[in-house]
């Protein structure tokens, strides 16, 4: 056992095999993610980022290769409920109040009502929405809804957090605020995060490593190590942050140029 | 600017109903008055009106409404027409209610089966659609004959006829509602390792409510229609359908009575519609939409 959080080996994903619309979304992908690491996936649209994330989360099966999570198959990890997932769209159930949305995964795990309500209160504090448990999702702004979705994903302390452009629909200010919150939560919980984004600065600001994917078929083009240490809001004006962003940008340019 | 007056919701409903009734009466009497003036022709032309306006074809509104409070014989007793109709409606309501719940159970079951297995959906959905093209009038005697052969009370046969009408909107809308959640919502449940059943109860059924209730309102009124048609086509001894049939036969003598019984049927239909609306408020609750 090597103790990796995620171990992706020789993974290939082909959609619509044998049909006219056959697409090779990913090919020959190897990646190892350490426990507690924050890794972002970045690349041009359609290069297979979401597919990669879904393979790790066992929402898709690879055509070839294997995905292991905490030393077991991705399927087993899903059955053990090791995953917390957040998508671009908050995806709250609009007939449930905010607190009940956060408690949904706890309910499915058979937690008692009292424990659930204690935990959802804690989570609401964590995402800075202490007074909104009794609201319905539609009464919240997009950014607030996204924070509830994050609270829901974190409520059962998943060992692995998978996030697919969770801040994509937010305005710049809210987005930066949410990035700060996410890093704070990541620090407090020590969970492993795989994060998909389109934003160069977001990837540099958030992660330990940025995985740059190239399209058709999706491959890992390069991996950029970000050595920024602990982040704060000042990091955004730190020259080293600009250097890191530049490095990611150049890797992406190289992808576009096809080199 | 007219000052806006705050009127409570129930009161507003009563007021709109009264205004609506007033408008219908006004139209009815207006049309009748015009016809009387022109000798049943469209004013300024010599084209005949579609419906003649004599008192036999179109009794005065006040006579029809008056009929509702005047006495009628019911067996050995006499009682006001409105009570008489209410008694008959109570019987029809029971048939309709049984039919409604049968249709609900059958419709929901079909929808869940079609959701679970695509094959069932492909195989069944066309037949569910075809089922509604069979005229009820043709179907009713068949159902009743089968029922009598199996010693089933006529009341139950009529409920079956009502259920035949009601299961359709339930099945179709429930299926749409159960299929309505986003792929992302379904994936979320999968990521929690939720079983098909758990996903049904925690995600699909709650999401289906918004689709189901409008259909249930239609189904409720259809169950009344089914019950009345059922009564008429098999000749029961009581019920609103029976009353309508009797009054139709004696139309030449008492035209107002037929109109009064039609009002009774409409009242019953509206009542069940209102009942489902109330249940909807309890079950769907607030979802944070702006109050309208
Ligand atoms: N369920 C599917 N069926 C068929 N093809 C798919 C499916 N999902 C993804 N694809 C294809 O796989 C490729 C990669 O898609 P994917 O959604 O992973 O890209 P992405 O990097 O997330 O793009 P974006 O940045 O636009 O979200 C695309 O060519 C897409 O058309
Ligand atoms: Mg994507």
Image (cartoon, coloured by chain):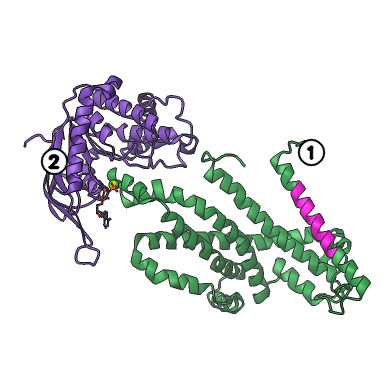
Chain colours: A purple, B green
Q: Is residue B127 above or below residue A222?
A: below
Q: Residue at x 64, y 55 (%)?
A: B273
| Residue shown at 14% from the left, 38% from the top | A223
- Front one among A183 and A236: A236
Relative to residue A234, is residue B52 depicted above or below? below
Number of other residues with Cα within 10 Å of mark 1, as a class: few under 14, some 14 to 19, many 20 or more: few
Question: On what subunit does the disc labeled 1 rest?
Answer: B
Chief secondary structure of the magenta portion: helix
The magenta segment is: B15-29
Secondary structure at badge 1 equals: loop
Give the quarter of the image for residue A148: top left
| Residue B28 on the magenta segment | yes
Residue B29 percent across, percent down from the top left = 87, 64
Q: Chain of mark 2?
A: A
Q: Which residue is mark 1?
A: B2
Residue B186 is covered by the magenta coloring: no
Viewer-side residue, A58 vs B223:
A58
Viewer-side label of 1, 2: 2
Is ligand 1 less than 8 Å from the beta carbon at label 2? no
> Which numbered disc covers residue A222?
2
Q: Quadrant of residue A34?
A: top left
Q: Which mark is residue A55?
A: none
Identify which residue, B35 or B105, lies in the foreground: B35
**Residue displayed at 43% across by 50% down:** B205
Mark yes or no: residue B277 visible.
yes
């Amino acid at each position: 056992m090597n103790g990796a959080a995620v171990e992706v080996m020789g993974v290939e994903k082909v959609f619509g095999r044998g049909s006219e619309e056959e697409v090779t979304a990913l090919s020959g992908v190897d990646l190892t993610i350490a426990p507690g690491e924050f890794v972002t996936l970045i690349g041009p649209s359609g290069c297979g980022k979401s597919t990669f994330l879904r393979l790790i989360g066992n929402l898709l099966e690879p055509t070839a290769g294997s995905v292991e999570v905490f030393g077991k198959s991705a399927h087993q990890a899903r059955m053990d409920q090791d995953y917390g997932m957040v998508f671009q769209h908050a995806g709250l159930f609009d007939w449930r109040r905010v607190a009940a949305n956060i408690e949904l995964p706890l309910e499915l795990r058979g937690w008692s009502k009292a424990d659930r309500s204690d935990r959802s209160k804690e989570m609401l504090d964590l995402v800075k929405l202490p007074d909104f448990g009794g609201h319905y999702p539609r009464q919240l702004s997009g950014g607030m809804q996204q924070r509830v979705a994050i609270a829901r994903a974190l409520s059962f302390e998943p060992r692995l957090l998978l996030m697919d452009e969770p801040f994509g629909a937010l305005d710049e200010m809210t987005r930066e605020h949410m990035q700060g919150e996410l890093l704070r939560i990541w620090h407090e919980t020590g969970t492993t995060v795989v994060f998909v984004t389109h934003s160069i600065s977001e990837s540099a600001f958030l992660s330990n490593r940025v995985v740059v994917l190239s399209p058709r078929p999706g491959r890992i083009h390069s991996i950029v190590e970000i050595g920024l240490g602990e982040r704060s809001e000042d990091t955004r004006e730190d020259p080293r942050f600009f250097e890191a962003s530049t490095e990611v940008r150049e890797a992406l340019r190289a992808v576009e140029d096809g080199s | 600017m007219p000052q806006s007056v705050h009127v409570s919701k129930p009161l507003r409903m009563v007021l709109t109903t009264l205004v609506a009734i007033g408008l219908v009466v006004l139209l009815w009497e207006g049309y009748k008055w015009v016809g009387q003036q022109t000798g049943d022709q469209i004013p300024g032309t010599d084209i005949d009106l579609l419906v003649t306006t004599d008192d036999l074809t179109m009794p005065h509104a006040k006579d029809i409404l008056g009929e509702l409070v005047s006495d009628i014989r019911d067996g050995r007793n006499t009682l006001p027409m409105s009570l008489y109709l209410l008694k008959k409606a109570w019987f029809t309501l029971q048939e309709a209610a049984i039919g409604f719940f049968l249709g609900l159970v059958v419709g929901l079951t079909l929808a869940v089966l079609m959701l679970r297995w695509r094959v069932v959906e492909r195989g069944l959905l066309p037949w569910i659609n075809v089922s509604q093209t069979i005229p009820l009038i043709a179907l009713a005697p068949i159902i009743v004959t089968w029922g009598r052969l199996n010693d089933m009370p006529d009341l139950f046969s009529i409920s079956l006829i009502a259920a035949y009408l009601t299961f359709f909107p339930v099945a179709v809308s429930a299926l749409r509602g159960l299929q309505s959640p986003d792929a992302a919502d379904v994936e979320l449940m999968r990521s929690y390792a939720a079983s098909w059943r758990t996903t049904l109860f925690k995600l699909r059924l709650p999401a289906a409510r918004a689709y189901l209730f409008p259909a249930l309102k239609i189904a409720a009124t259809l169950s009344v229609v089914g019950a009345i048609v059922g009564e008429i086509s098999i000749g029961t001894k009581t019920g609103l359908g029976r009353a309508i049939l009797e009054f139709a036969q004696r139309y030449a003598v008492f035209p107002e009575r037929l109109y009064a019984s039609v009002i009774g049927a409409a009242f019953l239909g509206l009542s069940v519609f209102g009942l489902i609306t109330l249940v909807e408020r309890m079950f769907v609750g607030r979802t944070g939409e702006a109050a309208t």
